[in-house]
Every structure is written in C-alpha cells, then in structure tokens.
Image (cartoon, coloured by chain):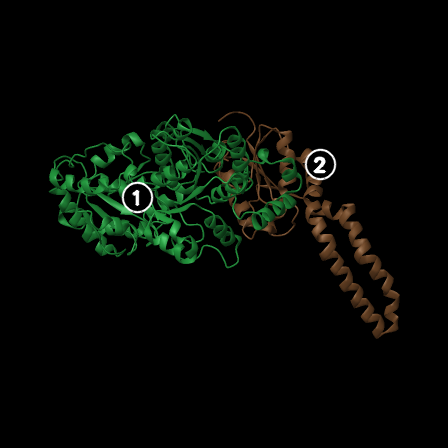
Amino acid sequence: MKAMAERRPRLLYLAFYYPPSRASGVYRPRATANLLAEQGWDVTVFAAPLTFLRDAIGSFDEKLLDSVDPRITVERPYLNQFVWQKNVHEFSRFRGTFPFLSRSVYDWGQKHVFPENYASWAWASVRRALRMHARKKFDVVLATGNPFASFAAAWMFNKLTRTPYILDNRDAWTLDLFTEEPAFEKGHPAYRWEKRVLKSAANVVFVNDALRSWHAERYPRVADRMMVVPNGWDSDTLPGTIEPPAKVHDDGEERRPRFSYVGTLTGKQPIEPLIEGFDRAREHPDMAGAGLDLHGYLGFFKGADTKLLKRIASALDPDAEEGPDLPSGVRYCGPVSKTELGEVYRNSDVLVFLAGGARYVTSGKIFEYMAAGRPIVSVHAPGSAAEEVLRDYPLWFNPGGLDPEAIAGSMVAAAKAAAGLDRPQIDEASAYAARFERTVSLEPLVQRLNELAARKGAVAG
Amino acid sequence: MSGGPSPRVLILVLDPKSHKRNYKRVAGLTSYFLDEEGAQVDVLTAEPRGWGRLDERARLHHLHAAEARHPLPWLERMVVTRLPRFAVRPLKRLGRPGDVLGRVQGRLSSAVHRRLFLPFYRHVRPLLLARIARRRIRREIDMGEVRRIIVMDVVSVPCAWRLARKNPDLTVTTRQVRTLDPDGG
C-alpha cells in the first residue's frame, strides 16, 4: 500500500502550442509542465507536429526548446494539414484527383464531427493516449485551448478511461475576446461541444475573473468547478534583480528616454494610437530625443510582418504613399531571444503596454513588464482586464483610453518618473510583481492536480 | 546573369471565375514575373473571356475549345437538350399545346442539366481539363524551363498534381507569392 501511495503522479498534458512553437500561448504550458516535472510529476505533453509549426504556419523558435525540462516526454500526434497545405507535392492522391470531393469530405467532418481544423490531432491524441495509458496509467489530463480540439480529446479520453481532466482556457472558445460578442452564430456545433466538455470536467480554469464570470453565467451548473489561474512572469527569462536604467539625461547620441514595447506585435493591437501618441509626446521639450523600440516578432504567422510594418509606417498619415521608413524615433528591433530579454528591459526607461481587446484580455506580457520594474504606459481600450493587475503597480501610467493626446501625456509623465527612478522604487515595484511569478500564480492549479492525482494513489514530490 | 534560357512560370487558372479577384491576381503575378524576374509566363485557362488586362507578353493557352469538343459535355448536350428539343419540334404545329410542351421540355432539360449533370461534371471537369492540359503542355511548353507552377483555383489541382508527380523537384504551389525562390512557398 505504501508503494502505491508513493507512486509518481502521471499527467497527460494536451498542449498543442508548445515549444518550439512561438505562439503566445506557449509560455503557460511550458511553465506548467516544467513546474510539475520539477515537483516530481511524470509529465507527457502532446503537442503540434513540427512540420505544422515550421512549414504550415512558420511560427517556430528553436531556442525555446532549450527551456523545456528534459524529464518531460513530448509526443506529437498526427494532424491533417488539409487547410494549410500549399505545396501540391504534399497533396494526397485523393485530393489531387478529386479536389472538390476531398474538400466536401473535409467540410462534412468540420460540420458534423468537430468544428475545428485541429480535430484530426485530437483523434490522434486520443488514440496515442490510449496506447500509452494501457502501458502505464495517466492519473490526470490537463488540456489547454486553443485549439479547443484538445478539450474534446480530454473529454473523449475521460469517457473511455474515467481519467479526470482539467480544462485550461488560455483563450475563450465561444467568446470573441476582441469584439466581446459570441464567436459563432446560434446553433453552431461549438456550443454543443463546449457544453459537453465543460460538463464532465473536474475543473475549468480561466486567466481572469471576467472570463470566469462570463462562462459561469452561461454554464451555471459548472460554475462551482471554475477557477481563475492568472498568467505570470517566468523567473527563468528575467534576472533576479533589475537595475535602474542608466540616467536618462546622459550625453552622446543615444536616444533618450527609451520607450520599449516587448512582445509579438499583432494586427489586433492599437498600433496607430501608440504611434500618434508617441509622436505628440516627442513635442515635449524633454522628449525631443525619445525613441520607441519595438522588440519581438511581427505577427504569429509567416507573411504578417510586411503588413504590420506598413501599418506602423503609415500610422501617422494613412493617406500617405506607403514607404519603408518608420515614423521618426520609432525603430523595429526584431525578435528577442530569451537570453537577451533581461538586457532589453534593462536598457529600457519606460515600457509601453500595447494590448488589443478590453475586459476579457489580460495579456501575459504585463506580468513580465511589472517584473522588469519599469514605469509602464498603458495603450489599450479602457476597462481592459490588465487594469485589474496593474491597479496596484506603483509605476503605472494610465491614459484611460486610446486618445493620442492622453497617451502622450502619460508617456511624458512616465519618462519623468523614469528619470528619477531609484532602487527603493524598483524594489517596491518588483515586490508587487513577485506575487505574479509563475510558480506562485500556478499554485492553485498545481494543488488541484495534486488532489486529483492523490485520489488515484499518486503523490508528487 | 547566366547565359541559359530565362526561367518560365506556369500559372494554372482553369476556372478564373471561381474567385472574383482571380483575373486581377493573375495579371499582377504575370507583370511581376515578367518585369521583376525577367521570366517568361504561360497562363493556362479554360475561360475565353476576361483576359484584357493580362500583359501581352504572357502566353495565354486556351482550353475551352478543346473542352467543348470533348465527348462528355457534347454527349450530355445531345442527350439532354438537343434530342428532346428535336423530338418536340414537330408538335409546335399543334399551336398552344405544342408551345406548352416545348416549354416543359426546356425546363426538364435545364433541370436535368443543373441538378444531375453539373454536380457530376463538377467532379469530372478537373480531370477532363487535366487531360486536355497535359496534351497542350506537352506540345507548347518546355517543362525543363519551368521554375514555378502557381495554382490559382481548385479546378486546376488535378492538372497541377500530375505535373508535380512528373516533376518532383519543381515548385508547384497554391501560394500566390511573388518569388522564384523554391523556398518561397
């Protein structure tokens, strides 16, 4: 009995976006799996096939693989890449001979079986999970969406093996986070599936309370099993102590103060208000040499970079001829590797928090920003879920919306604060951010996973 | 510049009406490859109209006449439309009843054509055009010079797929990117 009680708990983690993917949703599964492996769990992650990440969507960062705990087993079940295949050499004989019929068959599956292009990955995951389960039983399944096919896989695996599962909604399935409207028309099969998978889940996790409330209202019977596990910052990407920025008014040609945006820039973000606000801020006497550095990828998928660069370039004058030059003071610095992240924050005087959407979008980046101990200027719609966590951050400058004049005012105020920033202020900011360190924020989820595993006689640690 | 023949790009757009911007896209791609890459461009289509904006330097290969001559659509027209029309024509002399019969025959023929033949032909047409295209390509296009095949619509897929199998090193893609680089899609 004792040997049984001390058995290592075994987790099946259905995380389609997992390193080396560089999608925004990668960091939470990466940190969760690492933390659980650290705590003695036997973790198996089911992730997207590499061919999909590399060739189909071009969203790939090999360096991220180094941050995965080697004790974690990563499996990559098959995915039918029908909608992503562009190379005709890769088409099957059936598709190459009867393109309309193969499309009809594919669409039928979307309409009548599972309404997502990742459905085949879910089927393959269930098949592979059953094979692995037969050899050595899983104690718990943790599924993270999107894609939400992982939820369906967890549900089906539960129906076949009675293994409890937790659903982690990094995103929302049936709610469009940006328009705040239902994501599908009435009667869409996604609603049926969501109801089904939520009903049998041991717990359903959300990244903020606004999302939890929205789902609790729609699914009151599941409300008592819903919990909030906010995102956090990862201590392995940031140095333990952050130095104050070098004096803002130093000599030389260096651009001061330096505003930085760090993260993947997407079309959903309010780029134009940011550029316009920054341009107006530069009219202030202390801001003449100010620079705005954009660090990170342009878009999550290949082909998005040109469009976004054009959008930044023409932000001040939408009618102007599109040129390659960015507005004065704005610089695109390219992607930042994890090892360079600390350096970028250290060399920034003020961080610009640019986020699309409003009350349902927290954005994981904000936690890292706070941990960097720099003044933060918000550039997002009023009422963003991020405001909840920023409210008590001592160096937050909130223009209250997307009015460029107000953004400029906040930028000037933040630059002034940055000029006088000292060690106690940074320590105060860092102390506040410490409560959002990933291991701290994941604690309720880990605790719940431990409880579920203990029911099966497995104990971590 | 190498001394060899200039590269050739083959654009397969057998059914340009499948997307409203297909004509514009083909014209844009053609101009780019002609002007920026110095390539020769061949456009293969089964639609005779709508090519006014295409650069004159591109070679346009029409397949519509060969398609119309093909026994399958010809036979369907004969059995579904012409023969019934021929059969009811003498009855026109009966006056009003003859006219009604003629209209009924027209509607029936049209219904059979739309509801039975077209759904079937939708799946067969790409294969039929692929066959016609294969003969045309063999006769008129030196595949040794072709560097890239761009597939603009679903009807062109069987033709493209067969060319891809015959030329495993050739870039055959549905991505409409403006490059001759094999890694560009």
Residue type at the position of mark 1: Leu
Tell me whether circle 2 and circle 1 mark residues in contact (CB < 8 Å): no
Q: Which residue is mark 2?
A: B135
> What letter labels the chain drawn in green?
A
Please, which residue is most extreme toward the bottom here? B96
Q: State the quadrant of the C terminus of chain A.
A: top left
Query: Between residues A178 and B119, which one lies in front from this camera angle?
Result: A178
Q: Position of residue B106 (x, y in %)?
A: 78, 63
Element on which disc 2 rests: helix
Q: Position of residue A203 (x, y in %)?
A: 40, 46
The total of numbered circles placed on residues is 2
Residue A179 seen by the camera: no
The residue located at (29%, 29%) in the rendering is A339
Pointer 1 local density, CA inside 10 Å: few below 14, some 14–19, many at least 20: some
Judged left or right of residue B47, residue A291 is left
Determine which quarter of the picture holds residue A422.
Answer: top left
Q: Share a chain, discs 2 and 1?
A: no
Q: Position of residue A32 (x, y in %)?
A: 36, 36
> What letter labels the chain drawn in brown?
B
Pointer 2 local density, CA inside 10 Å: few below 14, some 14–19, many at least 20: few
Judged left or right of residue A45, residue A363 is left
Examine the rendered structure and indicate whether residue B180 appears above or below residue A150: above
Query: Between residues B111 and A178, which one lies in front from this camera angle?
Result: A178
Q: Chain of mark 2?
A: B
Element on which disc 1 rests: loop
Q: Which residue is mark 1?
A: A326
